[in-house]
Amino acid sequence: MPRIPLTWLADHVELPSDVSAEGLAADLVKVGLEEEAIHPAAVIGPLVVGRVLDVSPEAQKNGKTINWCHVDVGSHNEIGADGVGSRGIVCGAHNFVAGDLVVVALPGAVLPGPFAIAARKTYGHVSDGMICSVRELGIGEDHDGILVLDDSAMARFGILPQDAVPGADALPLLALGEEVLEINVTPDRGYCFSMRGVAREYAHSTGAVFTDRGLHDGGADRRAAGGGFAVELSDDSPIHGVPGCDRFVAQVVRGVAASGPSPLWMQRRLTQAGMRPISLAVDVTNYVMLDLGQPLHAYDLGTLAEPIVVRRSRPGDRLTTLDGTARTLDPEDLLITDSPDGDPGSRVLGLAGVMGGAESEVSEATTDLLVEAAHFDPITVARTARRHRLPSEAARRFERGVDPQLPRIAARRVVELLLEYGGGQADEAITDVDRTPAPTTITFPLDLPARLVGVDYTADEVRAVLSEIGCTLTEGADPAVVEVSVPTWRPDLAVPVDLVEEVARLRGYDAIGSELPTAPAGRGLTVGQRARRSVARALADVGLVETLSYPFVGAHQLDELGLPADDPRRNAVRLLNPLADTQPLMRTMLLGTLLDTARRNVARGASDLGIFEIGLVTVPEGSSAPGAPRLPGGVRPSEQDLLALDAAVPAQPRRVAVVLAGRRELGGWWGPGRRADHTDAIDLAQMVARTVGVEVVVGRSAEHAPWHPGRTAALHTSDGVLVGHAGELHPNVVRALDLPERAVALELDLDTLLEAAPEEPRQAVPVSTFPLAKEDIALVVDADVPAGSLLEAVRAGAASSEAGDIVEELGLFDVYTGAQVGEGRKSVAFSLRLRAADRTLTAQEAAAVREAAVAEAHRRFGAELRA
């Protein structure tokens, strides 16, 4: 995010003398630039100019010689016994003499580091402050000696001699007491990645006088374009119909001390803006980029061969960038190349708009430079930066849009600074290959902002706002409609509603009333949406907590769940650019991420928990599925492309999963608690199905990870379609995830349940006012007969009685094994609650229901009524 030093911003716009970073933030937020942070001053506390009165060298036992000095610090002096005012300071540097002006940090000051200054005894003296070097002040890397404010230094810092007197506050003289505002810039406001752009917005907010230093001054550049270093724009395959480069300005400067230091004022500003000073050539290009918003690059002219060719990458192209990384280039990459062997564009010099190459880097021996300022396609730069993971400062600006009229102005400013601080001479000829299109023109009804925003903006107000942001308005035959020529620094203004947004922004969002619009008539929620909400509500009503998790997993998580090597759930979609290298796969089962959530909560002390999640899983149907086509940006895909994309998307069914661990019922004075077991998971699965409107059949499950093979149920629809599993987790899985013993879980396919649900909405049934009849039956069957299957038999038999389907409630309440029922047998007891809607049941009718239920259970499983 851009950092805005206030004194630098003041070069472009008039700021009040008492403006603070906080006040600046308040003004900028009115026009949509939000405060990210306020960085405090580099130096806090008393920092003053001092004049050295005397210097007494003193040799020490360790072989070091220190200077015991008396320094006049004006009103901050301590008056000695001789009546002379000064401060005694110990200093280890030797590059100053009596009479020199220096910078003194007095006790109470805090230098960068942070390093607090206090009066302390050292080398046999009490040092009452510190004489500072450039590096100690945080304004450069020079640490060979202290900063002497001679004529040269004062010129470099822009200090007037009359201001540098003993006792004067050095913070404003060195701009060290300045706060820096960091702002957040939205992607459509790329021009605000510069002091020029932020100053313009400040002027919009406050009405302050703004001086646009990025506008071309017709008389300021007397050198004519043409005849300079040869440049060819050769983009034969634009990726979305737009050339990768439509303007390229180049200027040769000879005899420059390119590797020398930049002026201290420039280093200070670069540091405040968050960039590290390197050398004159690099610092000047960075400074102009931060100032105007135009990225630039300086090449060592001695390493170049004409012509420079801007082209797309070819097979076999490689480049070692300035960060020392060797990169294999992509056909979409736009490159800066030259021609050392006579073949145009044969050698790669850099990634256009992203980063230069090491081969043409400015070195300590460089004296001749080629300064480049170009305009590149935002989409091309953005894709290259992401492809090579190079989020450079230049790329951040180009991908958001840079003013195509800036290259000539920015290059001229770079050349001026190089000549001023590095000597040398610029060639008269300038290369300026300009193929930029005409500015965008928008036909704009002046009443559109009022109609869309709901505020009565007058036509004059709209005209004033559009003119203020730099638009040129042309009146037509219809006075209510104007032709708006958009300024070149605003590529985000492309359609009429963009201009409407500008009117609303600059006239103040607070002027827009907060009125809730009337919701349009519609069909409401879909059946699936209502079902999902009902399921979530039902699970929450029984005490479970809904969670959300990222749908990404790693192979180690599948191993923890005990999935066999040939399990189809291991066939997962792999992400090309995952958020975490340890989780590159899309989940194929919801429990993969829900159990990870459970583990994290148990590790933090929540040992009794019940959580659930409703979400999508990704299930590739096999390796035969076609791959997704790579489509160009900036254009609408064809119908065939859309069909190919749709065909490449794997199935994404919606699932619901639940995990219960620890106690399901807490203990207390009412009695002991109860740990969750597999019956709780099965009951919740049945509840989910009933909520959707489906009765599922509970059956014994074959071995299916991550569940316990003997305490897990498979759940099917009445048509035999598998919808999921519920039961106790395998002990190995519980140990791997550090969960409480006997933890249970379920996972159901909600989409499959919805397909099995009746199409007609369920109707409310009137509550019968007739009395309830109760019947209990205990059936003896083989021990391997599932209780759920026996329950279905009893239900079917009871419904088939001559009395009709009068079963209001059927439940299992006891399972018994022992000598009384015989070895290999068990007794399963059910309670029947019977009621008719139109009459009181007779004893004979209730008995008939009971007998029909026993008969059907006997027919299916050989069940016998227990005596």
Image (spheres, rainbow, N blue to C red):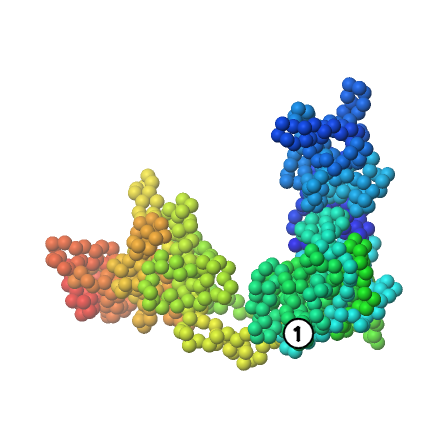
Q: Which residue is mark 1?
A: 341
Q: Is residue 443 left or right of residue 694?
A: right
Quadrant of the image containing the N terminus? bottom right
- Residue 516 or 419: which is nearer the viewer? 419
View extreme (top): residue: 81
Residue at 21% x, 57% y is 829
Please, is residue 856 above or below residue 163 in the view?
below
Residue at 56% x, 80% y is 639
Q: For residue 458, say whether it is visible.
A: no
The percent position of residue 358, horizontal first and vertical second, equals 63, 62
- Number of numbered discs on residues: 1
Res. 728 image quadrant: bottom left
Quadrant of the image containing the C terminus? bottom left
View extreme (front): residue: 63
The percent position of residue 76, horizontal first and vertical second, equals 77, 29
View extreme (right): residue: 219
Residue at 29% x, 60% y is 712
- Residue 420 or 778: which is nearer the viewer? 420
Q: Is residue 768 left or right of residue 479?
A: left
Q: Is residue 66 left or right of residue 642?
A: right
Residue at 70% x, 63% y is 299
The percent position of residue 714, horizontal first and vertical second, equals 30, 64
